[in-house]
Amino acid sequence: MDEQELRFLTLDWFLYDLSEESSETVASKEFPPGDRDEPLDGYIRHQKIQDSQMVQIDFSGEKSKEVKSLQELAKIQQTIRDYSNNYSNKSDKTSLGKLGSSWLVWGQLMSENQSPLSLAQAICQQLKFEETSPNWQVDLFAEGPLLGATLYELWCPPQGQGEGESYHLLICLFDSLWRKEALQKRVGYLLKHCQYLFLYRHKVVWAFQQSRHLRESLQKPSRLVPQVTNQSLALLEQSTVNLTELQDHLRENLKVLARYATQINYLQEQRYPIEINLENYRQRVLKLATLSAENSPKPLGEKAGECQGQGSSLLFDKFSQFAQDKYLRQIEGDYSSLSPGLLIVENSIKAVESLNQIEQTRSDRRLNTTLTIASVGVATSAVVATVVVAEPPQNRHQLEFQITTIVGSLIVGGLMSILAWKLLDWNRK
């Protein structure tokens, strides 16, 4: 027996995307026969789950071979990739797995002498992902018992804006003691729960990556905060203010505030899908832990399945704790650090608005004063002209009299305007 062989060696690829359709439908079909004489063992499953859709591609190579070498994994993975590309080209979508994807390798040990750890490490050496290969020392995220098997979880989370190296891989190696019927039952449990666990997990990671994009988009408006504040202070310190310039500055500030407030609000909203999907994830982990406890052999001196149930719960709960400690705290920290900038811009706008109102009031008051003074002068001139014209002197020429009357009325009107301005200024003081 080759130490690098497993019974029923199978590779599953779960790909997830958001979907506007909310109905839960399932469509499955057998894996295409290909060019080989031997029929291929596998299937493609398309399922809509809540607001998302999943495509699961399951493949284990030739049906006639129950025992397979780990060396075949690279070929199995490439076959899955080739079919995935063909499937996505035929569908309306241009690509699959925009929300996220997970790989699951499972098989059964040939004997109790085989080491699950050594086999899992050998499996990692056979697999390659889009931009990276598994690194056991760095990427091993969790390990533990599950449904009478040993499970290893490797994860390279997306960095920064979600680009670059990232993958999620589960390796599940069932004990050699299980008969084929019992093994099939446990594999069915595993696949059913994993499709939900992976979905909730990818939704959490996706929401966090959205928050990173929002955080990046906030860099530009956050850098405008000191500039806006300094400009506002400069305007407030001026002895004379140009009302048009002040209003233009206020308009620009309002644009910055609107953009800043909207992005910060979106950033804060990313907490909610993370919290909701983490709760769904935890509930699914509890169901799987209970199922694992009920379907595991009874260890000597313990209640039936107690160790298996606790192990699987701790195994998957590690991601919950990671997301709680890193993702949610990061978003809360970003929101706390960026919110003061929003308050500064709001206060700056309020100060500029107050200055604008003061200057507008001053402008209106000056206009009213000017109109009042002008009205007094015009009215006085009109009265004087009317009185003089009513009794014109008889010993003067008509044209000379009219010119003298106009000049005199203007002089009297001007004097009354000056007097009115003095009186209004004295009253204002």
Image (cartoon, helix red, strand yellow):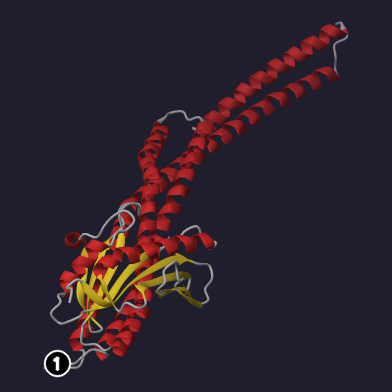
Residue lying at 73% horizontally and 26% vertically, measured from the top left: 379
Q: Is residue 413 above or below residue 331?
A: above
Tell me if I can see residue 277 in this picture: no
Looking at the picture, how far across and down is residue 374, in whole percent? 67, 26
Residue 262 position in % (x across, y down): 45, 53
Relative placement, left or right, of 262 versus 304 is: right
Q: Position of residue 64 (x, y in %)?
A: 35, 78
**Residue of label 1:** 302
In this picture, residue 255 sits left or right of residue 334: right
Give the left or right position of residue 401, taking residue 61 as reference. right
Q: Quadrant of the N terminus?
A: bottom left
Q: Residue at x 38, y 52 (%)?
A: 213
Q: Secondary structure at mark 1?
A: loop
Please state which of residues 323 and 304 is positioned toward the viewer in this rendering. 304
* Front-lying residue, 197 or 177: 177
Residue reaching furthest to the front: 37
The reply, left or right, for residue 200 in relation to residue 359 is left
Badge 1 amino acid: Glu
Q: Residue at x 42, y 57 (%)?
A: 265
Q: Label 1 neighbourhood size at 10 Å, few (<14), some (14-19), many (20+)?
A: few
The residue closer to the viewer here, 425 or 228, is 228
The correct choice, above or below, for 90 with respect to 191 in the image is above
- Farthest left residue? 301
Q: Is residue 74 visible?
A: yes
Q: Position of residue 235 (x, y in %)?
A: 42, 33
